[in-house]
Every structure is written in structure tokens, then in C-alpha cells.
Amino acid sequence: MELQFLGSGDAFGSGGRFNTCFLVRDRQGAFLIDCGASSMVALRKFGVDPNEIRAVMVSHLHGDHFGGLPFFILDAQLVSRRTTPLVVAGPPGLGTRLAAAMETFFPGSSRVERRFTLEVREMQVGETSNIEGADVTPYLMKHPCGAPPFALRIGVDGKVICYSGDTEWVEALGDAARGADLFVAEAYFRDKKVKFHLDYETLVAHLPAIGARRVILTHMSPDMLGCREAFACEAAEDGMVVSI
Ligand SMILES: [Zn+2]
Ligand SMILES: [Zn+2]
């Protein structure tokens, strides 16, 4: 199994990076974890065919994490001419927020007839949902975005991937990532403690207890990007492919 970072940036394009979007290739095909506003550009840049993506799993309802969906869905209809079902899974409220985003960006686009079915699944904290062959368990984080923010623990092909989403440190993040084969973690600042985001120093202090096999940092601010060589863990780059 492979994970490719199509977007490893923060909300503001720091370092010229795309908004959050990870492509996972498993035995069944491919799915996305998050689909930030710039994700269609990232898919095109890295030569990913949108039609091979069977599902999108969304951590939380900020534009840099789900704002690419209106573009993805419209592309599926008008450009990529998708015929296979697409499942979009995320926090409660996803259906309403996605429709509102689509209507804001492309009026009428949420209500048109399509040649493919779009299924929105709203997941609940602590409940494992089978999303197109992947077992996805959401954990509640601390990051206000108008809906419950999730870290996602995803079991697929006998491996476990955890993605923190955006959050300040909460014990539930340790539970979500415990023993994971790959833990992709937000590290927004190096040591500056800000509300609702995770800094590298705090994350590193918790890693021994988490016991993930591999940890890769993402969602870095200019402050973090400027001192990458000092990190004890790997840092993501757009385009980077990781075997799991
Ligand atoms: Zn973000
Ligand atoms: Zn966010």
C-alpha cells in the first residue's frame, strides 16, 4: 500500500504547497484523505486520474481540507465523465456544508443530475464505518470549524494509517494514532503554543507513548518549514510517496 502526499501545506499555501490532500493506493484502487481547495490542481500536477478515486475521507470542515470537493465533483461530471459511485465521508454536517460550498462556488451544481451517484456519509465519533473497504474510526479533536473535527484512524489491507487533521493536543489524538503503521501529524509551529493547532515540540513529547511505526509531519507554517533539518521526524513534501 502507498500513500502519496498530493498536498502537505497549510491553509495559506506556505512554501508553495497545496492544501491537504493525501492519495492512498490500496488493493481495491485508491481513495483520498482530505480534499483541500487546491486539490484538483494537485491531482492534475501529479497525474492522478480522478476516476480511480472511489472515496474521499474528510477530517474536518475547513476549506483547506474539504474545499476541493466542489471542484472534484464538478470535474467528475463535466470533465472526467465519471460513471462509478463516489463516496464522501466526514463529520456530521458534511452534507449541508458541501451543498452550501457547491452552491456558493458553482450555483446549481449541488442539484444537477449526474451519471454517477454521490453518497455523503456522516461518521460519528468512536464508531468505525466501513468506507468502501477501509475501516475508518473518527476521534474528536479540538479545532473549531462549525462541525466536530476529526482525527481519522483508517485500517486498510491489514495496515493502520492515522491522520491528525488540525488540532491542539488532546489525549484522543494519542488513542487515534496508537501503534499506527503511519501517523501523519500536523506540526504547525515548532514550539509556539497556539490554540487549536499542534506544535512539533508537543507532538514529539507524546510520540513514545503513541508508538507509531512511522511519523510524518504535515501542515507546516513558514516557521516550521524554515527549520526542517532540525526535526527528529520526517516531513512531508508534495508528491512524496510512502510505502506502508
Ligand atoms: Zn488546515
Ligand atoms: Zn482546520
Image (cartoon, rainbow, N blue to C red):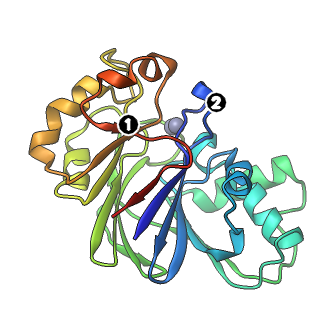
The relative height of residue 44 versus residue 172 in the rendered view (above or below) is below
Distance from label 2 to label 1 (Cα)? 22 Å
In screen coordinates, is 21 left or right of 111? Answer: left
* In the image, the residue with mark 1 has its CB under 8 Å from the nearest atom of ligand 2: no
In screen coordinates, is 109 left or right of 53? Answer: right
- Which residue in the structure is indicated by mark 1? 167
Tell me if mark 1 has few (under 14), some (14-19) or many (20+) residues whose alpha carbon lies within 10 angstroms of its own.
many
The C terminus - image quarter: bottom left
Q: Is residue 57 visible?
A: no
The N terminus - image quarter: bottom left
Q: Amino acid at mark 1?
A: Thr
Tell me the element at label 1.
loop
In screen coordinates, is 124 left or right of 171? Answer: right
Quadrant of the image occupied by residue 27 = bottom left
For the point 42% across and 27% down, the residue is 188
Q: Along the line of sight, which residue is nearer the eye, 18 or 143?
A: 18
**Where is residue 107 shown, x and y percent of the image?**
90, 54
For the point 49% across and 71% down, the residue is 25
Q: Is residue 171 visible?
A: yes
**Where is residue 57 shown, x and y percent of the image?**
51, 62
Tell me the element at label 2.
helix
- Which residue in the structure is indicated by mark 2? 16
* In the image, the residue with mark 2 has its CB under 8 Å from the nearest atom of ligand 1: no
**Where is residue 132 shown, x and y percent of the image?**
49, 80
